[in-house]
Image: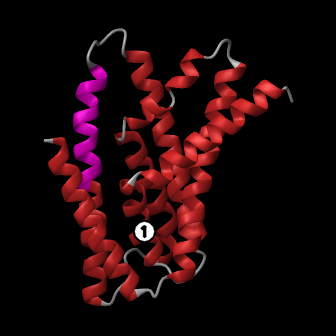
């Protein structure tokens, strides 16, 4: 592989990992799901991260394709997408708190991975901050260089969320972790909603 492509892959990996770890909305979105599982938390993180990556790439592609035809699209979608992210965080947190109070499961065991993927997909599609994170790809020449950078970005983001879920799964104490992470999810969601108004 050419040194330039290796550098682009590395830059994409770092940018994706930074995006995933620096967003309290990502950590608050996946933490209740991970805290609600008793084993293999990394799978929940992987599925949430995969959904998030797919949603982010779809939203960024759509916004890039439509921005010429609809001036101001990014600003309009950004305002609404931030509200959706805040609302989803509040719902996830509320479901987690309800599961703690009822001593039940957040989701049925067989639904956990599908729920994690779907919530990650919604979160990724709603957050247009990804568009700004992938803008360096637009400045790159040709097709190969942007694809390499975006592939690195997607892998970096997915790896960071999976690692976070794995670490949280090893340290969580189920009910206490679910209560704390769900409460934090609600708080971050309310803050996200307030910031978007």
Q: Residue at x 56, y 51 (%)?
A: 50
Q: Residue at x 61, y 32 (%)?
A: 150
Near-viewer residue (107 or 169): 169
Near-viewer residue (93 or 24): 24
Near-viewer residue (66 or 131): 131
Residue density around tag 1, few if under 14, some if 14–19, many if 20 or more, within 10 Å: many
What is the residue that sits farthest to the right in this orientation?
1
* Image: magenta residue range: 73-87
53 left or right of 100?
A: right
Say which quarter of the image contains residue 167: bottom right
Name the residue that disc number 1 marks.
31
- What x and y, as percent, mark residue 117? 49, 56
What is the residue that sits farthest to the top in this orientation?
69
**In the rendered view, would you say 30 is above or below 15?**
below
18 left or right of 95?
A: right
**In the rendered view, would you say 135 is above or below 54?**
above
Q: Residue at x 34, y 86 (%)?
A: 104
- What x and y, as percent, mark residue 158? 58, 51
Does the magenta stretch mainly form a helix, a strand or a loop?
A: helix
- The answer to whether residue 85 is magenta is yes
- What x and y, as percent, mark residue 38? 52, 84
- The answer to whether residue 186 is magenta is no
Q: The C terminus appears in which quarter of the rendering? A: top left
SS for callout 1: helix
């Amino acid at each position: 592989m050419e040194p330039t492509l290796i550098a682009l892959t590395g830059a994409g990996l770092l940018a994706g990992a930074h995006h995933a770890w620096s967003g309290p909305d990502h950590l608050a979105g996946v933490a209740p799901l991970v805290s609600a599982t008793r084993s293999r938390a990394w799978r929940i993180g992987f599925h949430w991260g995969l959904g998030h990556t797919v949603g982010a790439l779809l939203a960024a592609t759509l916004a890039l394709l439509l921005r010429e035809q609809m001036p101001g699209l990014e600003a309009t979608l950004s305002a609404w997408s931030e509200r959706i992210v805040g609302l989803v965080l509040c719902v996830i947190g509320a479901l987690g708190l309800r599961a703690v109070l009822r001593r039940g499961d957040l989701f049925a065991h067989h639904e956990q991975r599908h729920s994690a993927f779907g919530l990650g997909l919604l979160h990724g599609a709603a957050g247009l901050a990804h568009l700004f994170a992938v803008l360096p790809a637009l400045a790159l020449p040709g097709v190969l260089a942007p694809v390499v950078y975006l592939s690195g970005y997607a892998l970096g983001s997915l790896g960071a969320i999976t690692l976070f879920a794995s670490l949280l799964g090893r340290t969580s104490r189920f009910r206490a972790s679910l209560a704390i992470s769900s409460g934090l999810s609600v708080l971050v969601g309310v803050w996200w909603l307030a910031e978007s108004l």
